[in-house]
Image (spheres, grey):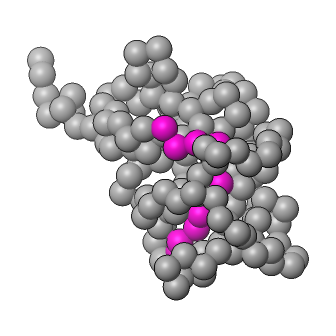
Amino acid sequence: MTNAIEQESIKVIVFQLADKEYAIPVSHVQGIEKLMHITRVPKTEKYVKGVINLRGVVTPIVDLRERFELPISKNEETTRIIIISLEDMEVGFVVDSANDVLDIAANSIEPQPEVVGSLGEEFISGVAKLDKRLLILLHLEKVLNPLK
């Protein structure tokens, strides 16, 4: 029995953090920028690196390595800022590299297993298996919520 659900897919941006691949829906991505000067803002969470002026819009920047409590790495040539739009908020995520734009079949997305490694499970909305790749889908609302 073939049904319309098998045909459904979501388009995602795939990016790298440490040795894992993560994905966020393209519908939330406003752009991908090279790393630029970030102005520090006092009294913010450690993972909030500061703000950038991107085409006249002041955008807060979150280092996802620090947000997920991964080892900090120095910025490389491949380091990117992915600009995310969620509801009425724009935020930039610092990632190791932005790799691909992929279509993921909705039926290939599974709920998060009990253990996915070092990432807090509240940040993950699911995992998708593509050939030999395992993509971790982020729950953007929870990533952007201040830590409790």
Q: Nearer the viewer, residue 25 or 111?
A: 25
Position of residue 94 measured from the top left corner of the image (x, y, whole percent): 65, 54
Position of residue 111 measured from the top left corner of the image (x, y, whole percent): 50, 31
Residue 102, visible in the rendered structure = yes
The quadrant where residue 141 appears: bottom right
Query: For the magenta stretch, what is the residue range?
Result: 89-99
In the displayed orientation, state which residue is furthest to the top: 132
What residue do we see at 72% from left, 41% from top? 120
**In the shown orientation, is residue 41 left or right of residue 132?**
right
Main secondary structure of the magenta stretch = strand
Position of residue 59 measured from the top left corner of the image (x, y, whole percent): 60, 75
Position of residue 19 measured from the top left corner of the image (x, y, whole percent): 67, 28
- 131 within the magenta span: no
Q: Is residue 123 above or below residue 58?
A: above
* Quarter of the image with the C terminus in it: bottom right
Q: Nearer the viewer, residue 75 or 145?
A: 75
**In the shown orientation, is residue 64 left or right of residue 28?**
right
In the displayed orientation, state which residue is furthest to the front: 77
What residue do we see at 52% from left, 85% from top? 56
**In the shown orientation, is residue 95 left or right of residue 40?**
left
Q: Is residue 86 above or below residue 97?
A: below
Total labels: the figure holds 0
Residue 141, visible in the rendered structure = no
What residue do we see at 48% from left, 67% from top? 86
The quadrant where residue 117 appears: top right
In the displayed orientation, state which residue is furthest to the bottom: 56
What residue do we see at 32% from left, 42% from top? 10
